Amino acid sequence: MKALPADLAAVCRRMKTERSVGLAVHERPDTDALAAAAGMLDLFAQLGAEARLHVDQDEHLPLEELLLPSGAVTRGPPPAGRPLYALDCGSLERLALRLTSWAGIVVNIDHHHDNTRFGDVVYVRGEASSTSELVCDIARALGVRPSRRAAQALLAGISFDTGHFRHDSTSAATFETAAWLVGLGANVTTAFSMLYEQGSLEALRLWARAVSGARLLAGGRALVATLRLGDYAAVGAGEEETEGIVDSLRAVAGVEIAALVKEQSRGPRVRVSLRSSSCDVSAIAALRAGGGHRLAAGCSCDDGPEEVTAWLSSELERRLSTASC
Ligand SMILES: [Mn+2]
């Protein structure tokens, strides 16, 4: 048998000794983060350890009932000193828990290339499709087969982070992992429907408003749309119903960078989502203290939507006027 990579072996060793752990995910957790948590909850249950997912009081957990077993979430931090498993989170400051340090052991399992490598045990693979895929690697290394329910969640996590197996992070290993999950009872159609076919008519109308107002920049190499509070109100959509809009903009022929500027009524005044087919947009997000992946990143700030759109437009014009971005 091939020897396990040292970092993967270290995570497995640590997990086998646990009796009671806390899991945590990044703020505003997405399907991959929650699916990774669902997978880890299942692995710990099978290892005979008690595990719970801890998030702040006000965090919204999308698809919670579908992804997570009931009663698995605690609002607030774990008891002091308990091992904390951070999932799909680039830094300790971005956790969906107000912690800046943790007295207990921290285990960092993630696939963000800009992960700060925080924690005592670090299993980070910047090239992996998703944290859900990494949890599957851990399961196989442990010799544990996820339950059918956990397998379904993990498949959804991989589907979400790869845009259903189309982003460039989708590797042969990703397909092998998906095949393994299907073998454990997960269903691809169920995953697709859960993630991509539950939109509301209001969300579709919001998409139409964003698309119709989008502006081409840099000779057609960038496309930027802005949603203001009045846009959500006009169609009756929620502020979170913007999933997929920026990807549609990016899919236009010739567009190398797409951006969606979203005004918000709570939290930071504006959030920006960036997508690219070739350029490192995490570098643009970093200019406003954001981050993410090379081809999919985001940032937020308290300036108004017009100011942010103007700043972003000139930044994109400047970057795309040079030969490479
Ligand atoms: Mn992820």
Image (cartoon, helix red, strand yellow):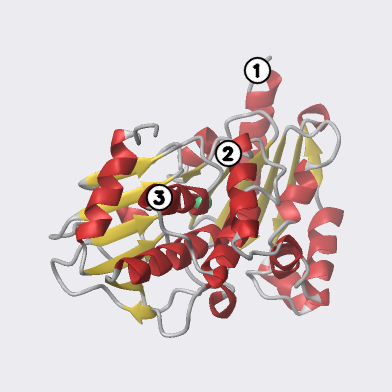
Please state if 69 lies on the left or on the right of 246 as rendered: left
Give above or below for 295 relative to 267: above
Q: Quadrant of the C terminus?
A: top right
Q: CA distance from mark 1 to mark 2?
A: 30 Å
Please state which amino acid type lies under the numbered disc 2: Ala
- The verdict on label 1 being within 8 Å of ligand 1 is no
Look at the numbered discs 3 and 2 and tell me whether their residues touch, using CB distance below 8 Å. Answer: no
Q: Nearer the viewer, residue 101 or 8?
A: 8
Question: Which label was assigned to residue 138?
Answer: 3
The image quarter in which residue 304 lies: bottom right
**Res 322 seen here:** yes
Please state which amino acid type lies under the numbered disc 1: Ser
- The residue pinned by badge 1 equals 324
Q: Nearer the viewer, residue 184 or 269?
A: 184
- The residue pinned by badge 2 equals 173
Please state if 284 lies on the left or on the right of 56 as rendered: right
Q: Residue at x 72, y 60 (%)?
A: 188
Q: Quadrant of the N terminus?
A: top left
Q: CA distance from mark 3 to mark 1?
A: 38 Å
Crowding at mark 2 (Cα within 10 Å: few <14, some 14-19, many 20+): few
Q: CA distance from mark 3 to mark 2?
A: 14 Å
Give above or below for 213 relative to 189: above
